[in-house]
């Protein structure tokens, strides 16, 4: 499928503030629990086709996760997805859909052909050592945009194609596990939807440096240009390299809060 496509703005060489704001927004028109997923067909890194019919034939509920190599959320979700698959993979099908690069750079640019995007999917599978299916969306992100083009969300889908659970962010592993465990037991998840944006942002902060390193030259500069507070948090997180990456974000937030309070007290003392 050697195509360059009619890019409608979905693919970008550099993210913008508009992209960041769009990522944080959850339109009411996006598919949600109770809705049927759209008709789709994607190809895995092994050449197999995943489509609506294959979900029905498999018979298991499926956890469908969207992500990319240069996405800090995806970077911070990898370990959790492997752990969940080890526990529930015999009863729940795990699928990652490789989408547009969230923070393209010189080493991992935004793909211009399907072959390049499929190559990124193979790198994504290898980078996270994912023992389950990784597939590639088409170049213009038809499936990704149909679900809502956030950088890395997760959906539980039953064999009939009905969405039973939605996580706005794929790295909120404890909440996703509750839903996956329920699905593995043959019951509907107790909560149909979770946001937990603050928790997701805190978890990804310590992993963001690795995602930007994978992206290569230009990605860190772009982050400073469009989101200086986030870039600063990434920089500060490096001071906590002795902590597990998933805990560095909380340390950064506590540090910033402490500094803010100290500055406030100092200013008050001189007034």
Image (cartoon, helix red, strand yellow):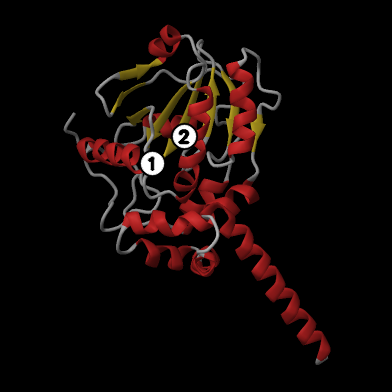
Q: Quadrant of residue 124?
A: top left
Q: Residue furthest front?
A: 242
Which mark, by number, is residue 228? none
Which residue shows up at 74% across the image and 79% down it?
262
Which residue shows up at 41% across the image and 7% down it?
57
Viewer-side residue, 268 vs 112: 268
* Residue 195 place in picture, x, y as percent: 64, 40
Q: Is residue 34 visible?
A: no
Q: Is residue 78 above or below residue 161?
A: below
* Residue 45 place in picture, x, y as percent: 27, 29
Image side of residue 98 versus residue 196, left or right: left
Q: Is residue 209 above or below residue 255?
A: above
Which residue shows up at 22% across the image and 41% down it?
116
* Residue 67 place in picture, x, y as percent: 42, 39
Q: Quadrant of residue 172?
A: top right
Which residue does the numbered mark 1 point to in the structure image? 128
Q: Secondary structure at mark 1?
A: loop
Which residue does the numbered mark 2 point to in the structure image? 82
Q: Is residue 60 above or below residue 269?
A: above
């Amino acid at each position: 499928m050697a195509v360059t496509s009619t890019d409608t703005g979905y693919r970008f060489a550099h993210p913008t503030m508009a992209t960041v704001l769009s990522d944080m927004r959850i339109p009411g028109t996006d598919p949600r629990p109770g809705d049927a997923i759209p008709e789709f067909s994607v190809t895995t890194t092994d050449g197999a086709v995943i489509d609506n019919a294959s979900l029905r034939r498999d018979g298991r509920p499926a956890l469908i996760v969207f992500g990319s190599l240069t996405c800090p959320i995806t970077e911070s979700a990898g370990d959790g997805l492997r752990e969940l698959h080890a526990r529930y993979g015999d009863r729940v099908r795990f699928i990652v859909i490789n989408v547009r690069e969230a923070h393209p750079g010189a080493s991992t640019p935004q793909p211009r052909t399907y072959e390049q995007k499929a190559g990124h999917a193979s790198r994504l599978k290898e980078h996270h050592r994912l023992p389950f299916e990784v597939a590639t969306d088409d170049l213009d992100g038809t499936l990704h945009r149909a679900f809502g083009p956030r950088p890395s969300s997760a959906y539980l889908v039953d064999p009939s194609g009905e969405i039973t659970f939605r996580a706005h962010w794929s790295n909120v592993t404890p909440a996703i596990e509750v839903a996956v465990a329920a699905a593995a037991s043959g019951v509907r998840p107790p909560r149909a939807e979770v946001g937990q944006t603050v928790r997701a942002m805190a978890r990804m902060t310590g992993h963001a440096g690795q995602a930007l390193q994978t992206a290569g030259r230009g990605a860190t500069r772009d982050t400073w240009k469009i989101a200086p507070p986030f870039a600063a948090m990434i920089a500060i997180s490096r001071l906590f390299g002795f902590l597990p990456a998933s805990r560095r974000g909380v340390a950064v937030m506590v540090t910033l809060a402490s500094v803010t309070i100290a500055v406030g007290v100092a200013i008050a003392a001189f007034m």
